[in-house]
Image (cartoon, rainbow, N blue to C red):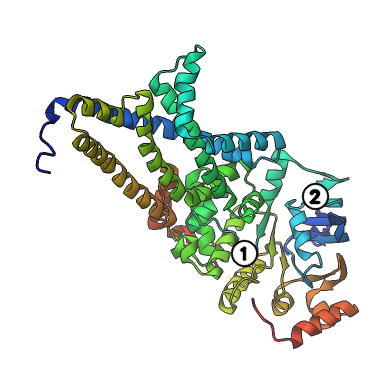
């Protein structure tokens, strides 16, 4: 056990590990943002009244939910290359992750959207909000509150899922791990160190998302526009007592 | 009234709400079977009747949350529904801004503070600049006695407080009329008193209101007129004290004696 860190010249690998670390982050950020957009569009499409739109969305979701990610990656990277469509490992990997997690996120977002009572939409309409504004300011924020826990789980899962890029030589942490392990023949210590790096990334991310969830449920103003309005409210309350003088007999 | 006595002001202007031959069916079931009703400016009308008699449906037709099957609806002289055609798009959105609605279950927006609930339709519907919207919101919250709760979220407020936020929110848009759909049916007695108190003050300020309610005492004391609904039609309509004190139609009589003798349960 005491030779865990012997035999591997870690200092030599720091630049490579750093590059791999950044690569893991790039895969995560790019594919999560894309998956969230795909997920939201798909969730809205699933709830559309126009049948062909909701059917197409459903076919997408069911396909990618039921296809192993690794198979999908092989199709995008090796499969497409064999017919002349050459995607880089990063392109194929990010696309694969985005399509795969987009399908799961669409289910989570759909549950969020359906979790907002119909009467909330009616109340917004009754107040003279257009359907677009109702979606943006009444439905989506409430759906987001419902969807945050599931979304957090998927975000962490996606970060860990980037390790599958090892199958296409993706250049991220796990790929780098295999390179160091085959260089040094110290598989145990190398993969434990790689594991610790994933842990150090994922654990704080989970905590952060949990905090976001709590703050959203407490109704805290998180968006810039809400902060601005709440600031105005505080300000007017402070120096606006004259405001009330005339309004009540 | 300080206006010239030769001109009866109220009679000459169009009513706030005018319904004619209004019908509404859900599937094969006809809920409204030809309703005619005028609500004049400044008038408080109470709508009474058994559940399922069409009271809520009438209210929901007035701001086109429900689309009538036939008949006509005019708001302040403007036809918004006739010959099976309803106003659409921007006109519909503008109409809804002119007719405020308060629901049985409040429907305040739970993700926003009380003041933001009032600000939202002002800024994102009526396009009022934020600073003015905030001032208006705080004025309205003050009017319903909630100035100190402006930055509270609905889950920390009582039902009565939430309903008063909903009233402030509807009031802020300066509507031609306010529609109340059983505003106290989901409230405990104390909250009911609070909310009815606010509605009473609005009545004293001359707000035009249609209130669907089971509170007979409130209808008698606050409403100018009552309309009694049964089975999709108005069976009796007239001066509030007269109809409640001396109902003529057998069904009105049965309903009112039933309400007075049964211990009134609030659910």
Within 10 Å of disc 2 (Cα), the crowding (few <14, some 14-19, many 20+) is few
Direction top: furthest residue: A84
- Which element type, helix, strand or loop, lies under badge 1? loop
Chain letter for mark 1, please. Answer: B
Direction front: furthest residue: A185
Chain letter for mark 2, please. Answer: B
Q: Nearer the viewer, residue A22 or B101?
A: A22
At horizontal 75% and vertical 41% (from top left) the residue drawn is B88
Within 10 Å of disc 1 (Cα), the crowding (few <14, some 14-19, many 20+) is some
Query: Picture coordinates of residue B266 (x, y %)?
Result: 65, 78
Estimate the spatial distance between the alpha carbons at disc 2 and disc 1, rounded to whole Å.
Answer: 31 Å
Q: Taking B124 as reference, is A235 above or below it?
A: below
Query: Picture coordinates of residue A207 (x, y %)?
Result: 32, 50
Query: Picture coordinates of residue A121 (x, y %)?
Result: 63, 51
Query: Picture coordinates of residue A15 (x, y %)?
Result: 19, 25
At horizontal 64% and vertical 56% (from top left) the residue drawn is A119
Q: Taking A81 as reference, is A137 above or below it?
A: below
Q: Taking A67 as reference, is B107 above or below it?
A: below
Q: Who comes first in sequence, dot 2 or dot 1? A: 2
The answer to which image quadrant residue B234 occupies is: bottom right
Q: For mark 1, what is the residue?
A: B105
Q: Quadrant of the N terminus of chain B?
A: bottom right
* Badges 2 and 1, same chain: yes
Q: Nearer the viewer, residue B33 or B96?
A: B33
Residue B133 visible from this viewpoint: no
Which of discs 2 and 1 lies nearer the camera? The answer is 1
Q: For mark 2, what is the residue?
A: B77
Is residue B13 found left or right of A245 in the rendered image? right
Q: Are marks 2 and 1 in contact (CB under 8 Å)?
A: no
The answer to which image quadrant residue B245 occupies is: bottom right
Q: Quadrant of the C terminus of chain B?
A: bottom right
């Amino acid at each position: 056990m005491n030779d865990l860190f012997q035999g591997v010249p870690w200092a030599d690998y720091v630049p490579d590990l750093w590059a791999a670390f950044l690569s893991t982050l790039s895969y995560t950020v790019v594919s999560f943002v894309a998956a969230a957009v795909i997920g939201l569009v798909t969730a809205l499409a699933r709830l559309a009244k126009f049948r062909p739109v909701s059917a197409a969305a459903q076919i997408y979701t069911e396909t990618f939910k039921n296809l192993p990610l690794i198979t999908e990656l092989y199709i995008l990277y090796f499969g497409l290359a064999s017919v002349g469509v050459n995607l880089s490992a990063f392109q194929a990997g990010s696309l694969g992750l985005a399509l795969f997690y987009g399908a799961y996120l669409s289910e989570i977002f759909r549950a969020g959207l359906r979790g907002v009572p119909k009467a909330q939409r009616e109340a917004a309409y009754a107040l003279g909000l257009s359907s677009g504004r109702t979606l943006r300011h009444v439905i989506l924020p409430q759906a987001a509150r419902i969807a945050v826990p599931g979304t957090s789980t998927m975000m962490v899962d996606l970060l860990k899922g980037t390790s599958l890029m090892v199958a296409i030589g993706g250049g991220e942490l796990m790929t780098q791990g295999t390179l160091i392990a085959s260089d040094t023949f110290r598989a145990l210590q190398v993969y434990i160190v790689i594991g610790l790096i994933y842990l150090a990334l994922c654990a704080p991310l989970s905590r952060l998302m949990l905090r976001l969830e709590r703050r959203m449920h407490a109704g805290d103003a998180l968006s810039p526009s809400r902060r601005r309005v709440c600031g105005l409210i505080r300000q007017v309350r402070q120096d606006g007592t004259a405001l009330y003088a005339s309004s009540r007999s | 009234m300080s206006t010239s006595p030769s001109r009866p002001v109220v009679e000459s202007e169009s009513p706030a709400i005018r319904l004619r031959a209004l019908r509404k069916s859900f599937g094969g079931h006809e809920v409204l079977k030809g309703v005619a009703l005028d609500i004049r400016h400044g008038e408080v009308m109470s709508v009474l009747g058994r559940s399922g008699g069409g009271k809520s449906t009438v209210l929901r037709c007035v701001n086109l949350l429900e689309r009538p099957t036939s008949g006509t609806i005019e708001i302040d002289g403007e036809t918004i529904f006739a010959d099976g055609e309803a106003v659409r798009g921007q006109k519909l959105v503008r109409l809804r801004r002119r007719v405020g609605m308060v629901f049985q279950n409040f429907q305040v927006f739970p993700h926003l503070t009380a003041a933001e609930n009032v600000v939202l339709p002002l800024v994102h519907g009526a396009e009022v600049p934020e600073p003015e919207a905030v001032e208006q919101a705080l004025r309205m919250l003050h009017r319903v006695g909630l100035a100190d709760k402006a930055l509270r979220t609905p889950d920390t407020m009582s039902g009565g407080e939430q309903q008063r936020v909903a009233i402030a929110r509807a009031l802020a848009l300066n509507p031609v009329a306010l529609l109340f759909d059983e505003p106290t049916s989901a409230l405990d007695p104390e909250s009911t008193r609070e909310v009815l108190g606010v509605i009473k003050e609005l009545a004293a300020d001359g707000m035009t209101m249609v209130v669907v309610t089971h509170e007979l005492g409130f209808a008698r004391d606050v409403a100018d007129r009552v309309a009694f609904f049964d089975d999709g039609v108005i069976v009796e309509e007239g001066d509030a004290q007269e109809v409640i004190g001396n109902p003529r139609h057998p069904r009105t009589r049965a309903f009112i004696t039933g309400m007075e003798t049964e211990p009134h349960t609030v659910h």
